[in-house]
Image: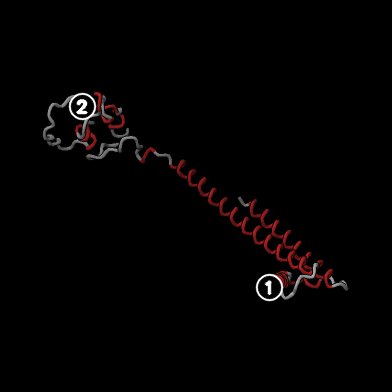
Amino acid sequence: MTEPRPAPEPAPATDPVPGPEPAPEPGTAPAARATSLGPRPPLGRPSPAETAPSAEREPPAGREPSAGREPPAGREPSAKREPSARRARFRIRGAAVRRRAVDLVAAAVSLATTVVVAILAAHIVFTAFEANPGNEIVRWAGARAHGLAWEFKDVFQPSNAKAEIAVNYGLAGLVYLLAGRAAVGALRRLR
């Protein structure tokens, strides 16, 4: 077991003429050599290396001093870091990512449901108010609504064609709305 080396003495506060730096002693730590490098702080204030507590310059308790290696000032050695704190931080980040992903999927389901219900409602309104069937928007809404209503197109068969479209396509829109809201609620519970 080796004895810990004493900290080097600080350089005098005033250097009359900067000269060549003396060669470091073999086996001294890099942090100890760094105290004599660079300009001095103004107004005679000590440099941070001189004011650093001696505990930061000594090796951690129960460990041999490494050959010329010391942890940088202001950082804990990796042996002292708490692994459970790091795991907890990753769990928090993972939960935040999962929550954000669930929110995005729930928003996408809600938006899709709203678009489908709006197309079905537009077709009902166009039919009820006898919109021009030659109009491109009316044809597009009718074709999409016909595909989206799947088996609900002929659930009820009243004698009036307008009432048949309003009831059947309205029922399809209601089913989409309820299913979409149930899916969004289930997704939000996963958070």
Residue under the image location 71 percent in, 62 percent down? 118
The answer to which image quadrant residue 158 occupies is bottom right
Q: Residue 113: x percent and y percent?
A: 68, 61
Pointer 2 or 1: first along the chain: 2
Residue drawn 26% across the image and 36% down it = 65
Q: Is residue 174 above or below residue 23?
A: below
Look at mark 2 in the image and give the residue it sits on.
10
| 152 lies left or right of 25 | right
Q: List x then y, in percent, for residue 119.
A: 70, 65
Location of residue 71 (image quadrant): top left
Q: For this view, does 160 lie left or right of residue 138?
A: right
Q: Nearer the viewer, mark 2 or mark 1?
A: 1
- Classify 10 Å Cα crowding around label 2: few (below 14), some (14-19), many (20 and above): few
Tell me residue 102's x, y (percent): 59, 54
**Residue 147 position within the rendered picture, expressed as x and y whole percent measured from the top left:** 70, 72
Describe the element under mark 2 as helix, strand or loop: loop
Q: Which mark is residue 136?
A: 1
